[in-house]
Image: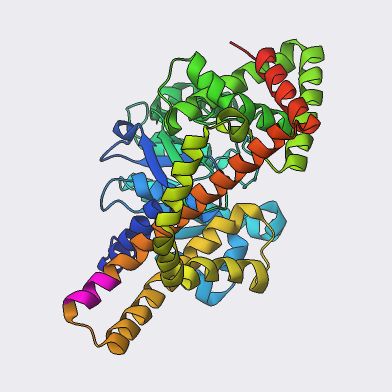
Amino acid sequence: MSNITDYSFSFSLVRNYIIFNFKRYYGEYIVTGRENVPLNCPVIFAPNHINALMDALAVHSIAPPKTPVIFLARSDVFKNPTAKKLLNFCKIMPAFRMRDGIENLGKNNDVFEQCVGILSQNNALGIMPEGDQGEQRKLRPLVKGIFRIAFATQQLQGTSPYVKIVPVGIDYGDLSKFGKHIIINIGKPIEVSAFMSAHQQNPVIATNEIRDKLRNNLNDLLVNLASEKYYDCFETVIKVANSTYVKSLNLIENTVSRFAARQEIVKKLVGLEKNEPDNIEKLNSIANGYKELMNKLNLQTWVLETGNQTKTWIISRSLLLLCTFPLFIAGLLFNFLPFFLPVFIRKFLLKTQYEGFFSSLQFGLGILTFPLFYLLQTIFFGLWFNSTWWLIVAFSLLQYPFGKLALKWNVQAKKLWAILRFRLLIQKKSSDLLQAQKMREQIIRMISL
């Protein structure tokens, strides 16, 4: 562990390759608050934890150049010797939990001292303050380990500014699908020194105060569906009212605006649950009925909002898709194996059931399969067609862009098909569709600004 903070050439090469691909795994990679990342001081990045390895990579992607972020991970993944070497190379240290056995908890003291040593050298730690991972888009209770490490390191400088805890809110467009958005919101650093006087008098009170501070800051950076009973209702209502709220808040229609609108909707819903139990119960009933109808119709909310397109729009979009169909076929042929092999391995060989690990597994496999298949296809292309060098180079460079184009074509084709089905249901005067539209309007009225 003595060299875990070293920024070796091999680590730099691997890190840069992974982060380069990480940013391209998502359709939109958005970072806000980069100015809040401190330099030349001990830093603890504290992200929410919903998506396994991808959360850690999100933090690595915002860290200053040549700054390794040392993470803590559950100790059971270190049992395999090969995995242990790989994790050490990736600058990940074990943390022991009660479930790992009471006899192992004492080992945390060594880990604790190593963390203090890492920070005291002006390095960065990454600690998931929730302690474990959950699939639901909510902030879970924060554990005390991160604050214990922060206070122990801060004691080296007393009440002078030194250790910073940086809250990081990560929002995923989808936990498992490639090509969705990721928003990384970096909050203002929390000065641990501001809590040192209180800590010297009463460590428990000071720990609770800084924990509340971090929790409140993270809450401002997330869409925190903070409800046990009405979580599913919250999810449905957010989808239904998102576009309406964007317009009501006079925001420009984009991913960041939709995120801000979702935050406002959650505030409204939390207020309803707290202050208007009858109304939230009624809203829950309507939202559940709406969700059932939309599943029955096999439609998504966006279709009700934008699906009533003109015949001219439908014809022009159909012609565009038809004209670009050869490009879709080319992109599919060049990318079928690298795109779908990781998914096949995850589903049928590893049989992973936990959705919060899907992206991490598919991404990890993808960064290996993509270059391998692209190299093999380029060699085959050069040999089979006896091509000149510039054609071989062009082919090698165009494989991935064609793959992205094929994915976008597929998305647009599915949208067009959904709109056509929607228009057919309108023509048939579907009672289920009419009921779903009425329920959507009811939901929007009940949570209007």
Q: Position of residue 51 (x, y in %)?
A: 56, 49
* Residue found at x 53% / y 44%: 128
The quadrant the N terminus occupies is bottom left
Q: Position of residue 12 (x, y in %)?
A: 29, 62
Residue 183 visible within the image: yes
Is the residue 405 above or below the residue 244 in the image?
below
* Residue found at x 23% / y 70%: 394
Does residue 391 show up magenta in the picture?
yes
Q: Position of residue 228 (x, y in %)?
A: 75, 31
Does residue 243 show up magenta in the picture?
no
Stretch of the chain drawn in magenta? 390-395
* Residue found at x 72% / y 32%: 231
Position of 442 with respect to 245 (left or right) is right
Residue 107 visible within the image: no
Main SS class of the magenta portion in the image: helix
Quadrant of res 191 = top left
Q: Position of residue 31 (x, y in %)?
A: 37, 38
303 and 125: which is toward the camera: 303
